[in-house]
Image (cartoon, rainbow, N blue to C red):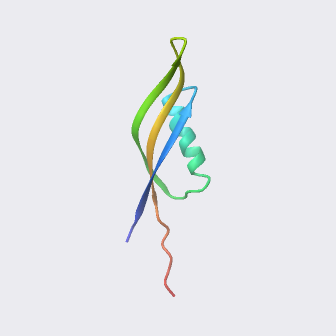
């Protein structure tokens, strides 16, 4: 049987939305194994002097739960 878990993560970048998502994956993968997918829930930007200052992403990361054998 396969069991998956979902966590919600906020990420940002000064470069792009894609970079913000990659930053999420880079950080989450330090402690989470078997990442299956990333669902982008929301995107926004902050603006300074009529220019985009920061790209922000609210994402849900789905990953597998490691099965252990009962002994």
Depth check: 21 or 10 in front? Answer: 10
Residue 4, quarter of the rendered image: bottom left
Q: Residue at x 50, y 76 (%)?
A: 68
Q: Is residue 51 above or below residue 13?
A: above
Residue 23: x and y, percent?
57, 39
Q: Residue placed farthest to the right in the image? A: 30
Q: Residue furthest bottom?
A: 71
How many numbered discs, if any? 0
Residue visible at 44% across and 28% down?
Answer: 44
Look at the image and tell me in which quarter the N terminus lies. Answer: bottom left
**Residue situated in front as seen by the camera: 59 or 35:** 59
**Which x, y percent locates residue 36?**
45, 53
Pick out the residue farthest to the top. 49
Vertical placement of 35 versus 65: above or below? Answer: above
Task: Reply above or below: 23 against 63.
Answer: above
Depth order, front residue of 32/49: 49
Q: Residue at x 55, y 57 (%)?
A: 32
Q: Taking 31 as reference, is 41 left or right?
A: left
Task: Tell me what residue is drawn at x 59 percent, y 45 percent.
Answer: 26
């Amino acid at each position: 049987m396969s069991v998956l878990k979902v966590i919600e993560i906020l990420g940002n970048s000064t470069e792009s939305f894609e970079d913000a998502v990659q930053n999420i994956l880079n950080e989450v993968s330090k402690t989470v194994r078997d990442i299956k997918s990333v669902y982008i829930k929301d995107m926004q930007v902050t603006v300074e002097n009529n220019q985009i200052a920061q790209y922000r992403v609210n994402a849900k990361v789905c990953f597998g739960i490691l099965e252990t054998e009962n002994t």
